[in-house]
């Protein structure tokens, strides 16, 4: 996750309108340095674009966190979906596709350890894992577009990850 400065975090959480005059001056200097500008070149548009940039990046990190933390499947078990888990699920699905005689799959859950799944149950879990990731990515994309289309600081601030 990208490390945010205190002022960047405040901008994301509370918006630019919450800044004191001192915070605003410090933020203008910070943005100027980050963008290779003089502080007098920083305009309201510069601040708006920077707000959009850091909020999109912050939401990208939230999206990644949401995906890798896992999900509860319809069978009531909680499954991890970090990068290795996703690769392993694809490998297991490929194995099931290649060998239709496989009737059960032993797979790790976070709440009950390794459990035996029927072929159909495991394929359902796989589908739900894929949908968990896809839904989260589509949510991120929708929110990103709202941020990028925002015309004011208040519109950027109004976009929240829920």
Image (tube, rainbow, N blue to C red):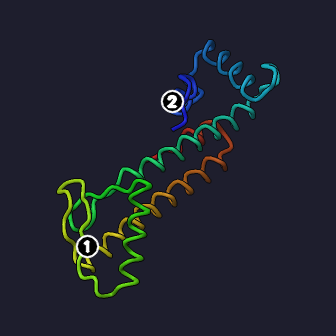
Q: Residue at x 56, y 24 (%)?
A: 5
How far apart are labels 2 and 1 at the CA level?
Answer: 48 Å
Q: Position of residue 48 (x, y in %)?
A: 68, 35
Outermost residue on the bottom side: it is 101
Q: Position of residue 80 (x, y in %)?
A: 33, 55
Q: Nearer the viewer, residue 121 or 85?
A: 85
Look at the picture and state if 161 lies above or below 14.
Answer: below
Q: Nearer the viewer, residue 11 or 59?
A: 59
Look at the picture and state if 152 lies above or below 24.
Answer: below
Residue, disc 1: 105
- Give the side of residue 136 with respect to residue 107, left or right: right
Q: Residue at x 65, y 16 (%)?
A: 26
User: Does dot 2 land on a helix, a strand or a loop?
Assistant: helix
- Between circles 2 and 1, the one closer to the viewer is 1
- Give the side of residue 137 with respect to residue 67, left or right: right
Look at the picture and state if 87 lies above or below 55.
Answer: below
Look at the picture and state if 91 lies above or below 81.
Answer: below
Residue, disc 2: 14
Q: Residues within 10 Å of mark 1 (few under 14, many from 20)?
A: some
- Image marks 2 and 1: residues in contact by CB distance under 8 Å: no
Q: Residue at x 38, y 57 (%)?
A: 81
């Amino acid at each position: 996750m990208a490390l945010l400065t205190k002022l960047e975090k405040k901008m994301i959480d509370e918006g630019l309108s919450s800044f004191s005059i001192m915070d605003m001056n410090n933020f203008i200097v910070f943005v100027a340095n980050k963008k290779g500008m003089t502080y007098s070149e920083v305009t309201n548009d510069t601040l708006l674009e920077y707000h959009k940039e850091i909020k999109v990046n912050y939401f990208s990190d939230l999206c990644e966190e949401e995906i890798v933390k896992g999900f509860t499947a319809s069978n009531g078990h909680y499954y991890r979906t970090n990068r290795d888990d996703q690769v392993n699920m694809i490998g297991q699905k490929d194995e099931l596709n290649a060998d239709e005689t496989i009737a059960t799959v032993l797979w790790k859950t976070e709440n009950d350890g390794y459990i035996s799944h029927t072929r159909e149950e495991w394929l359902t879990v796989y589908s739900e894992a894929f949908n968990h990731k896809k839904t989260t990515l589509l949510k991120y994309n929708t929110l990103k577009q709202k941020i990028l289309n925002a015309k004011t600081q208040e519109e950027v601030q109004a976009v929240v990850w829920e």
